[in-house]
Image (tube, grey):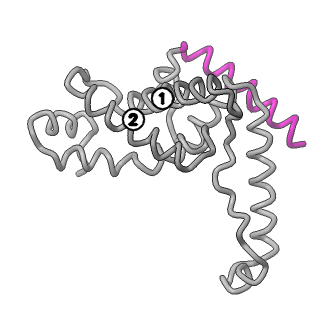
Amino acid sequence: MEKTDDELVSEYLDGDEKAFEELYHRYNIQLFNFILSMVKDNEAANDIFQEVFIKVINKLPSYREGNFKAMIYLIARNSVIDFIKSKKNKNQRNNISIDQNIDEKHTLEDLIASGENPEKELITIYENKKLYEAISTLSEEYREIILLKHFSGLRFEEISKTLNIPLGTLLSRFKRAMDKLREKLI
């Protein structure tokens, strides 16, 4: 039976390094993709990702049982916001995008060689790109909810804690975000 996050945190705090490794492996891919989707820069996402796990380690001694996943996403979100603010302060481009590595390197020959249906694969790539473009046009509060729900797999309760907004407000914003997406995609 798989241990809960809280059990692993407790074991790590008792000196078991492997417990933290398990937590890391449980969330590293999702968390990195969330960060990358917000900053759209692989190098920056890598830096932020490492910073997040350092902050997580430093925060664990004061962690109270609850929702580890929500805590790490809150730390990641705040780190991304700090990055964007610092980037903006340096008069650099301030563009949050969710263009999550849509693989445009596929050539028709690659698609045919892969055994996949090239037409179907190209349609999927095109539809995903349109979806990502539509999401990137949403306001930050709507975009963030969509990213946390659909691309990071958080439950609404976890998103509510991460963003520090009441669940009812979150659900209302999610519905409005989905309505806006539908309008843009139809």
Which dot marks residue 52? Answer: 2
Which dot marks residue 79? Answer: 1
Residue 63: x %, y % from top left:
25, 23
138 falls in the magenta region: no
For badge 2, the amino acid type reads Val
31 relative position to 167: left or right? left
Q: Nearer the viewer, residue 183 or 30?
A: 30
Asked where in the image residue 134 lies, by quadrant, the reply is: top right
Asked where in the image residue 137 lies, by quadrant, the reply is: top right
Cα distance between the residues tagged 1 and 2: 7 Å
For badge 1, the amino acid type reads Ser
176 falls in the magenta region: yes
Q: Residue at x 34, y 31 (%)?
A: 68
Residue 46: x %, y % from top left:
47, 47
> Marks 1 and 2: CB-CB under 8 Å?
yes
Q: Earlier in the sequence, mark 1 or mark 2?
A: 2
60 relative position to 71: left or right? left
Q: Characterize the local packing of mark 2: few (<14), some (14-19) or many (20 or more) Cα atoms within 10 angstroms.
A: many
Q: Characterize the local packing of mark 1: few (<14), some (14-19) or many (20 or more) Cα atoms within 10 angstroms.
A: some
Secondary structure of the residue carrying numbered label 1: helix
Instruction: Write the start and end of the magenta stretch as one range.
Output: 165-186
Residue 95: x %, y % from top left:
71, 34
Query: What secondary structure predominates along the stretch shown in magenta?
Result: helix
Q: Residue at x 64, y 55 (%)?
A: 101
Secondary structure of the residue carrying numbered label 2: helix
Q: Residue at x 39, y 42 (%)?
A: 50
